[in-house]
Image (cartoon, helix red, strand yellow):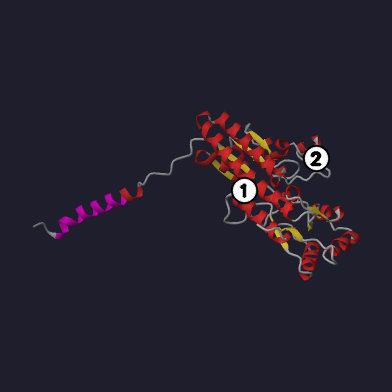
């Protein structure tokens, strides 16, 4: 029998060998398709729905409390964009930081601009938002636009990655069917509650309200001032507050949860005091949510419930 001290080197060698085996677990496989960078996680989610596991997606804005209108890009953002094969942005003056990052990237990624794809904007609104006037740039609340963006992504990803073309096309088709179902559910709100009027704190949900057949009764001077981060005229505030009173009061108040000011808090307080339901909508996906369809379905359901449309 060997002395114990003679066995110690052998035991140590076996232990090290075992540790080495545990540390050499295979690394996760790198997706074979393009690298995509999106301005917000809304567009990141749409890209992921189309690209699936074949692509790598990075969203620059993921903070549910951030206001993308005023976002300041970082050096890390510049690195991400410089290494991207494809960039997805909203355009229309919403995420100008993305345009600047692409221009300074030193590379030429394919760019999908949702505003340009939408066909909703006047010509000057597609020029990075300079002078976009009264155009509502929140085009991800336009369900037909989201379908168009998915189709464009599928086509551009297929060009960059021909081996994945069938996957991208099939995924975009499935996604489009889901968004089309959402569009039908939104349209059913207006059919169930014809003529229903709502108030908003800013134009964020405008396209969804149109699809739902609801009337935005908010004075333009109020919602536009909030969006531009200025104080609404006193008369516009008074007119907005009056929307929650009387037999013809609005069915709901839709607030942008990422743009909160003393004035919007005052309006929200008036709605709650009058028993008018408040619906919170956001400009990015909330924390823990990564699916565009599930997120938007929740907002459609909340809107339907608020205006009393049976589901």
Per the picture, the main secondary structure of the magenta-coloured stretch is helix
- In this rendering, does residue 294 appear at all? yes
In the image: residue 281, left or right of residue 200: left
Q: Is residue 257 visible?
A: no
Q: How many marks?
A: 2
Q: Indicate yes or no whether the magenta region holds residue 234.
A: no
Q: Which mark is residue 130?
A: 2
The image quadrant that residue 280 belongs to is: bottom right
Placement of 111 over or under 294, stated as above or below: above
Residue at the location (83% across, 56% down)?
A: 218
Nearest the camera: 30 or 287? 287
- In the rendered image, the residue lying farthest to the right is 235
The residue at the far left in this view is: 1
**What secondary structure is found at the residue carrying circle 2?**
loop
On the image, the x and y values in percent for residue 7 come to 17, 56
Residue 12: where, in percent of width, then height? 24, 54
Across and down, in percent, residue 212 comes to: 73, 50
Residue plotted at (50% across, 30% down): 163
Q: Is disc 2 in contact with disc 1, using a CB cutoff of under 8 Å?
A: no
- Asked whether 81 or 300 is in front, the reply is 300
User: Split into 4 quadrants, where in the image is the C terminus?
Assistant: bottom right
| Position of 139 relative to 195 (above/below) | above
First in residue order: circle 2 vs circle 1: 1
Q: Nearer the viewer, residue 192 or 171?
A: 192
Residue 16: x and y in percent read: 28, 52
Question: What's drawn in magenta, residue-wise?
Answer: 4-19
As drawn, the label of residue 169 is none
Q: Which residue is mark 1?
A: 41
**Residue shown at 85%/61% (left/top)?**
240
Badge 1 marks a residue whose secondary structure is: helix
Which quadrant is the N terminus positioned in?
Answer: bottom left
């Amino acid at each position: 029998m060997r002395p114990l001290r003679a066995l110690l080197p052998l035991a140590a060698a076996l232990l090290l060998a075992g540790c080495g085996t545990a540390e050499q677990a295979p690394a996760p496989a790198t997706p074979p398709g393009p690298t995509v960078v999106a301005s917000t996680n809304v567009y990141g989610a749409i890209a992921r729905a189309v690209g699936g596991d074949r692509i790598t997606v990075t969203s620059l804005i993921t903070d549910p409390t951030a206001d993308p209108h005023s976002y300041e890009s970082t050096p890390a953002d510049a690195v991400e964009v410089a290494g991207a094969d494809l960039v997805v942005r909203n355009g229309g003056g919403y995420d100008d930081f993305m345009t600047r990052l692409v221009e300074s990237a030193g590379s030429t990624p394919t760019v999908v601009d949702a505003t340009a794809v939408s066909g909703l904007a006047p010509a000057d609104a597609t020029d990075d938002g300079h002078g976009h006037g009264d155009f509502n740039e929140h085009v991800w609340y336009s369900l037909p636009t989201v379908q168009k963006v998915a189709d464009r992504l599928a086509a551009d990803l297929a060009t960059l990655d021909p081996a994945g073309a069938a996957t991208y096309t099939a995924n975009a088709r499935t996604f489009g069917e889901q968004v089309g179902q959402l569009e039908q559910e939104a349209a059913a709100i207006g059919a169930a509650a014809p003529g229903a009027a709502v108030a908003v704190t800013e134009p964020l949900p405008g396209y969804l309200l149109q699809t739902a057949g609801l009337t935005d009764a908010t004075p333009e001077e109020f919602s536009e001032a909030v969006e531009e981060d200025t104080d609404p005229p006193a008369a516009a505030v008074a007119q907005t507050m009056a929307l929650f009173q009387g037999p013809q009061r609005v069915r709901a108040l839709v607030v942008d949860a990422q743009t909160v000011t003393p004035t919007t808090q005052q309006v929200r307080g008036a709605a709650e005091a009058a028993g008018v339901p408040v619906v919170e909508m956001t400009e990015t996906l909330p924390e823990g949510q990564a699916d565009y369809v599930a997120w938007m379905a929740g907002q459609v359901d909340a809107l339907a419930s608020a205006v009393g449309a049976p589901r």
